[in-house]
Image: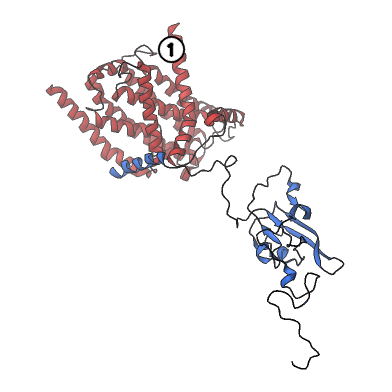
Amino acid sequence: MISILRSIWYTFLHAFSKRITVGYPEKKPYLPPRYRGRIVLTRDPDGKERCVACNLCAAACPVDCIALQATEDKDGRRYPEFFRINFSRCIFCGFCEEACPTYAIQLIPDFEMGEYNRQDMVYEKENLLIQGEGKYHGFNFYRVAGVDMGVKKPGTGENEEPPVDIRGLIH
Amino acid sequence: MKEIFIIAGVLLIALNIAAGLIFIERRLLALFQDRYGPNRVGPLGLLQVVADVIKIFFKEDWIPPFADKSVFVIAPGILVATILLTFAVIPFTPEFLVLDSNIGLLFFLGNSSLGVYSIVLGGWASNNKYSLLGSIRASAQMLTYEVFMGLSLVGVVMTADSFNLREIVEAQQGGWFIIPQFVGFLIFFIAGLAETHRTPFDIPEAEGELVAGYHSEYSGMKFGMFFVGEYLGVTLISTLITTLFFGGWLGPAFLPPAFWFFLKTGFFIFLFILVRASLPRPRYDQLMEVGWKILLPLVLLNILITGAVLLLK
């Protein structure tokens, strides 16, 4: 009996506590920087596409919503000919971001992607590609990679030894 | 002519309060649960009721092919009709009263007993095992609590020496009956909860076990009648608690009697919603056990003591 009255009283006290609901369209909730929302393709500090079309994101995707086709430019640098994400399938798991070796594909704190037409949920490369570097500033894959894509000479990258002179007698 | 205005006024007030309660209850429950509730349609969400009614009118009013058609249609009407009829004997103010009946209280008890038919017939006519289970529970629960409801009011009737609700209010000019009849009030409140089958006594419609109980098969405005009937019942029990135990329209004279009546009624409606927000549903046999083993002896004792005190005076 007392416990019943006590629970009624505690419920009544809740009338004066702060409401948890955030009135969404008027008041935007705080989204942390690592929030997994809309997927973007980022560029390196030189303004070139980071994506090397390795297909790891498409392989990691559990719902197969990523489709891309690799191609090479005249220097032999790989880039995606098309890059397509079907956001009506995407479950925003972030596996693509984890799989990406070049930080090209990133999930950003934006979820307001509603469309009236289902076909509009399919984002092409021009919809995905942004001008900036996303979450990883100053990272350029070809500065740490061994291959020469005109970004740096071999042996001049970060944590990289000069190339071995295979004709030298010291080694 | 004056009577017609009063009848129309009582109907208007009762139905509007019942419809408004659908909104108010959702907002109050949200308040107790640290939410906002419906606040989108119109200012503060006030037009939510209008939106709900429009929606419920445009829904398909479907009668299942296996149902007993005529009884199925009549059942929700009985509920609303019996409750609305009872509002006739409620004295809102000394003048604003449809029927100044000498058997007002008995009229209420009789009508609330008839209201059980609505639920029993509704569940039976649905021809669905969950509906039938719900209506069996409802009939057992309501018959049980009908007994205490009647007996808890005997003390009031003895003290006021009348079945006329207006005279009962006037007999409280010396002091509200809540003080001498506190046990009667408690038991009437509990019986009122069970009578309107509100949480925690919503066992007939226990959605965790019986889909929606006796109104599982109902849709459209027929369901709406059951729904509004529940809120009409809450309003009715609140007005009766006000009338029987809290001095009805009586109050300091600087405000009109109607104001005091609605203030007190509003408080008990609030209490109904607060109880709903707080308490879980008991098991069916626990409900019956509390009813017969605790409340019945208590209410009989209340009558005995009231009678003894009145005799000694």
Q: Please name whichever residue, B109 or A13, is drawn nearer the observer in this view of the structure.
A: A13
- Please state, as top left, top right, bottom left or bottom right, where the N terminus of chain B lies in the image: top left
Residue that extends furthest to the right in the rendered view of this protein: A74
> Residue B121: x, y in percent?
47, 31
Question: Of the residues shown, which amino acid type is indicated by label 1?
Answer: Ile
- Chain for colour blue: A
B216 up-or-down from A97: above or below: above
Residue drawn at (45%, 38%), measured in percent from left and top? Answer: B31
Q: Quadrant of residue B272?
A: top left
Q: Which residue is mark 1?
A: B6
Chain B, chosen colour in render = red
Numbered disc 1: secondary structure: helix
In the current view of this chain or complex, which residue is farthest to the top? B1
Judge left or right: residue A163 versus residue B192.
right
Q: Position of residue B178 (x, y in %)?
A: 26, 27
Above or below, B66 against B166 in this view is below
Q: Position of residue B198 (x, y in %)?
A: 41, 35
State whether residue A61 is above or below residue B71. Answer: below
